[in-house]
Image (cartoon, rainbow, N blue to C red):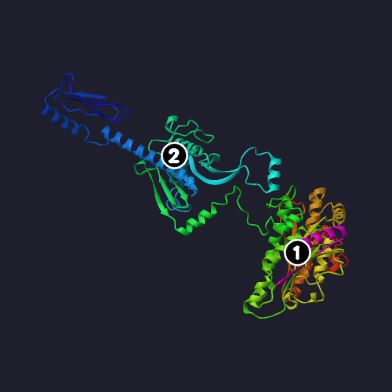
Amino acid sequence: SFVLVARPKTWPMLLLMNSCSSFSFPNQQYSLAKGSSFCLGLHTNQNNFIHCRDSILSTLFSKSNYFDTSDELEINELQENKRVQDAIEKFISTIRLSLNEESFLYFTLRGPPAPRLSRRKYPAKSGIDDEQRLNQEKFLAKRKEQLRGKFKKISGRLVSLRDGKKNDNKKRKKESSSGNESDGVSLHLQTTIKYHLATDMAQNWKVNECDEVELGLKRIFSSALGSSNKNDVGTDCAPSSEWGVIENARGESGIVDGEIVTSTGIYSLRLYPPSKAGLKLSKKKTDKVKQNNAQSTLSLSHDKAKNVQLSPSSPFFQKLGVSSLNGKPLVGMSSKLRQCQKFVEIVGKLVDNSSFIKSFKQISTSGAVQAPPTIRVIDMGCGRGYLTFSLHSYLCNNFLMPENEQKANCKPGLTVQTQGIDRRPKLIKEINGIADDLGGEFSSLRFIEGDIGNTDDALFGDDSGSDSIAKNTLDILIALHACDTATDDSIWFAIQNNADIIVTAPCCHHQLRPQIDRHSNKNPDHPLADILCHAIYRERSTETTTDAMRALLLEIAGYNTQVFEFIGGEHTAKNVMITATKMEAKLADDNERLKKKRKRLIELAHFYGVKKQKLAMLMGENLGWDNSVKLGIVNSMPPL
């Protein structure tokens, strides 16, 4: 005998029994609807029992849309759950094994992807009904909202972190000065968890304590699988976003797939669909790749290596008191180090793009013998020489050919000569002593005492009237933060000596400020009256007008100019840089171009009421106040 039971909201379950109470089996057909309760029994001999059982089952369960045998469903579900759990255990054990063997590189786990509107099916400009597209967008928005708080991507990498208190600055300084940076530093597995429409989070697990790594991974999988029983994974603290643990709908998985990348191979994890869950070695790596990965795992650091032009641990940085032995900037010198790096990057590009360097490379390739070419640099108002040392070191490292290569190739190498000029004799003596102590490439770096724009022993010689290729030199003048009209003096010195590259960062624009103040007060109907009536805007207008006039005057002198911000305002308030490179002779002497530039200069001067400007006076350029009527210049805003 047997009893067939159909339970509400579940699948039918068949119970076979040895004996049963007497039941009657009416001679009529029975129909079952999904979710109904039904009980059927019969009492008969063994042969009739088998026949009746088969006929009843074939009749009741012929339509698979309503019912299926619970045995098959329960067995399949158990098998799928076992496959998922086995894959997770293999994933965790593989990570532990690779950490013990020091072959681990990183791991990645991916959750359900966010749905996107198909551009091919719903192009932006097409004849598709807007309502249909709108409905699809609403559906996608609803689906994205359902994913809120679920895992999007989980990644883990190895980092070196310092143990103990983070604010123990005294201990850090002692360790950095003594060079024992490795003390108190341990290896961690840093896991970054990204959620759908929620705030990301990170966790650090000590590698030496494998239980911590295993426990953290189990917590992640517990949260992803939506396990409500803490005994499933041995923890009750699964990581979740600010939206809490999001339960998965039936047939969904919080983690779809992932991978483990080691120096020995790549392991692929698959958790969805559960019937195909597993972990397998998807790709083996060659011996060469293994060696490269093994070398990369030796130097582990939490910070990303920066691509800089100069090494922060350079000896000259240490001598100048910018950085320590390990390359870290000293207290209050981070901005100065960043400023030096950015400065040499800008000047380096100007040198690379110069016709002098291009012709030198062509001559070096062809093998023609000539006198050794030279890059000559003058730093007007060098101060303590931070930028002077930085630029000299950069040019030597990038353009100076070692003597052994010169002898081997039988070619003259490019030489670098740098000169810093400042008025303070004590400072000049100090930084010359630093250059002498460094020796080597810094033997061609000298500092002399003198005034900006008025130095008899300047590096640029009598051949300054020729172009760079003819005189076989590339002349560079730099003047950063030369106060007020000292910037004009340095620019004029460069123009007089036909410098190829001019780099300035003006400072303290005092000459034009009284003139703009008087002009704004005398002209209440000025187009910028509502701006110039405020002192802060008059100060900024003065800086802008001064540098704009300098750029125009440099273009009149035959230079291509650029004005830009060369470093952030948090490092220095005077962060506007003017760069000028020599034009070709034909373009520089174009009368039509010069006429337009002079006209724009006069219009700019009249618009702000500027009657005197130091660089214009040195160059002999007329600002148009004596013959303004003949030039047709009026005291109003020029046409745009």
Residue 38 place in picture, x, y as percent: 24, 25
Q: Quadrant of residue 12?
A: top left
What's the distance in space between the residues labelled 2 and 1, CA to CA? 63 Å
Q: Residues within 10 Å of mark 1 (few under 14, many from 20)?
A: few
Residue 293 place in picture, x, y as percent: 51, 54
Q: Amino acid at mark 1?
A: Gly
Q: Is residue 420 visible?
A: yes
Give the number of the mark in front: 2 or 1: 1
Q: Residues within 10 Å of mark 2 (few under 14, many from 20)?
A: many
Q: Is residue 133 left or right of residue 385?
A: left
| Residue at point 82%, 52% (across, down) | 525
Residue 349 in magenta stretch? no
Residue 604 place in picture, x, y as percent: 79, 61
Which residue position is annotated with label 1?
A: 439
Magenta residue span: 414-443
SS majority, magenta: helix
